[in-house]
């Protein structure tokens, strides 16, 4: 996957996670959350040995979005203390 596609998927995943978690972030924070979420989601998929269907866009977008949602959820748990 090219770096541009990775950034686009990260940005979209961060935006979707922001809306799901009912947050209000800016463009840069969405990008960062989406990219870190892609790594979190990828780690979970490999650790749990899950097969992700969906070609070059949909599958990675789902993995990155789930990872970004988990990242925002964990951040809210830590920030709440």
Image (tube, rainbow, N blue to C red):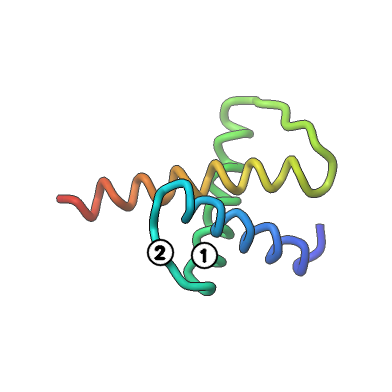
Q: Secondary structure at mark 2?
A: loop
Residue denoted by label 2: 24
Q: Nearer the viewer, mark 1 or mark 2?
A: 2
**Dot label at residue 30:** 1
Residue in front for this viewpoint, 30 or 39 = 30
User: Where 30 sits versus 45, above or below?
Assistant: below
Image coords of residue 56 (percent x, y): 83, 47
- Residue 36 to residue 70: above or below: below
Q: Which type of secondary structure does the marked residue at label 1 adopt?
A: helix
| Quadrant of the frame with the N terminus | bottom right
Q: In this figure, what is the number of numbered marks? A: 2
Q: CA distance from mark 1 to mark 2?
A: 9 Å
Question: Where residue 72 sits: x, y (%)?
Answer: 40, 51
Residue situated in front as seen by the camera: 64 or 45: 64
Q: Is residue 59 left or right of residue 16?
A: right
Q: Residue at x 71, y 46 (%)?
A: 60
Residue 77: mark in rendering: none
* 73, above or below 26, in the image: above
Taking the spot 79% from the left edge, 49% from the top edge, the residue there is 57
Q: Residue at x 68, y 47 (%)?
A: 61
User: Badge 1: few (under 14), some or many (20 or more) residues near its Cα, within 10 Å?
Assistant: many
x%, y% of residue 9?
A: 69, 57
Q: Position of residue 25 (x, y in %)?
A: 43, 67
């Amino acid at each position: 996957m090219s770096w541009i596609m990775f950034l686009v998927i990260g940005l979209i995943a961060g935006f979707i996670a922001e809306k799901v978690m009912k947050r209000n972030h800016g463009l840069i924070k969405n990008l960062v959350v989406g990219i870190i979420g892609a790594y979190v989601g990828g780690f979970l998929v490999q650790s749990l040995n899950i097969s992700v269907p969906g070609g070059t866009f949909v599958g990675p977008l789902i993995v990155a979005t789930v990872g970004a949602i988990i990242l925002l959820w964990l951040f809210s748990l830590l920030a709440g203390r």
